[in-house]
Image (cartoon, rainbow, N blue to C red):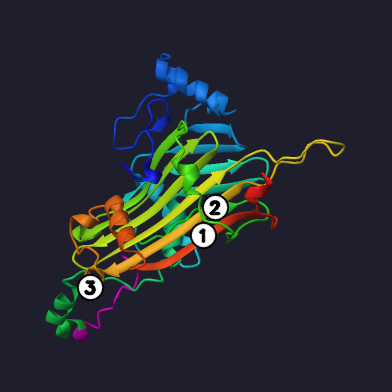
Amino acid sequence: MARWEERGRENFSLTLAHPNRSPSPPLKNLPLSISEIEFHSAVTAAGATVLPDATGISGLGGWTLEARTAPIAGEADLAAVRARLAGHPAGPAPALPEQLFAGSYFRASHAPSGVCLAFTAAGALEAWLGGAAAEAPPLKVREADAWAASRAADIRAHAAPTLAYDWTFTAPYAGDLSGARASWAPASRPLDRVALTARDPILLWAEVPLLESELDDHGASVTSLRVRAMPGAWFALARCFVRVDGVAVRLAEARILATWGVRGGGGGEKGAQPPPPPRVVREVRHFAGTFEQLRAAGAPGDGPAYADGDAASDALSAVAPVGVVKFETEELRVGGESVDEKNV
């Protein structure tokens, strides 16, 4: 794919297989080929090491990056997720998506600061359950009004209740942040696209599915994550794509870029300065609109333009600010301190 956030799968990167594809055996079980020698050389040159179970990389700018793609959850995993959501202030969950990848995750841990940013299926469902989609009105399938009108008498006679919950599993999920005194604050600069277009070797590439639903054959809802790591940065794209056929589309994207460097001026009597806090910028964009509204504004109507999240992102980005309901850029702060580009 041509877009800068889609670079990956270079021939010597550590690539994690999708759970529905045939997985590659761990690197440690393969004979060293030319590409693997190049891969290990690139990792070593970056001052990092491959984790023993080949799920990620450690020591990359102070970060340990772990990614795992697991199969669709079985009953035991589903029960555990239901139990967790039952303890949520808005729980229990009224339903779960047909495909829940409960064992899939991405975790970025920064040892010097104690900061950890994690993405999990349960975390995405907590965002959905907590009303993260409140900025967009509830959606109905296109046949809903006609169906209700044809049964209006029966509905009144039986006082049939209306189940009021977001059945599309819209989860604008931007990750779960933990660590002492870690928080997000408005950023002083935008996401650095230049760092992402640099042709550096890609040391890790992963596509992590979190949840999927076909919305009872009325569309699609997919929440997933793409991750790649280079010698001087790691990047994650979290995306929730929702399409209700003939009705509307929603797209929530969070782009997270972590970069690092060595703080200058550390000599003299004072000795070397302590390492700076992690430099992490997060850009959040949410799109939402009915196909009627989008067509009126010059965007494509329902069809191939919204076949999947990649296509929808292209179509909606091309007509922005049409359909944009949220756009913000934040930076990670640790103890109130952020990293200024000039100081590293």
Dot 2 or dot 3, earlier in sequence: 2
- Residue 159 as seen in the image, left or right of residue 133: left
- Residue 337 as seen in the image, left or right of residue 164: right
**Residue linked to disc 1:** 329
Marks 2/3: CA distance?
34 Å
202 in magenta: no
Marks 1/3: CA distance?
29 Å
**Residue linked to disc 2:** 281
Label 3 neighbour load within 10 Å: few <14, some 14-19, many 20+: few
Q: Secondary structure at mark 2?
A: strand
Label 1 neighbour load within 10 Å: few <14, some 14-19, many 20+: many
* 153 over 276 or under it: above or below: below
The residue lying toward the viewer, choosing from 281 and 96, is 281
Range of the magenta residues?
156-168
**Residue linked to disc 3:** 296
> Quick check: marks 2 and 1 in contact, CB under 8 Å?
yes
* 134 over 306 or under it: above or below: below
Q: Position of residue 54 (x, y in %)?
A: 47, 28
Asked whether residue 267 appears in the rendered view, the answer is yes
Q: Main secondary structure of the magenta part?
A: loop
Residue at 25% across, 79% down: 160
Label 2 neighbour load within 10 Å: few <14, some 14-19, many 20+: many
Asked whether residue 98 appears in the rendered view, the answer is no
Q: Amino acid at mark 1?
A: Thr
Residue at 65% across, 51% down: 340
Q: Position of residue 157 (x, y in %)?
A: 19, 86
* 128 over 10 or under it: above or below: below
* 138 over 208 or under it: above or below: below
Q: Secondary structure at mark 3?
A: helix
Q: Amino acid at mark 2?
A: Val
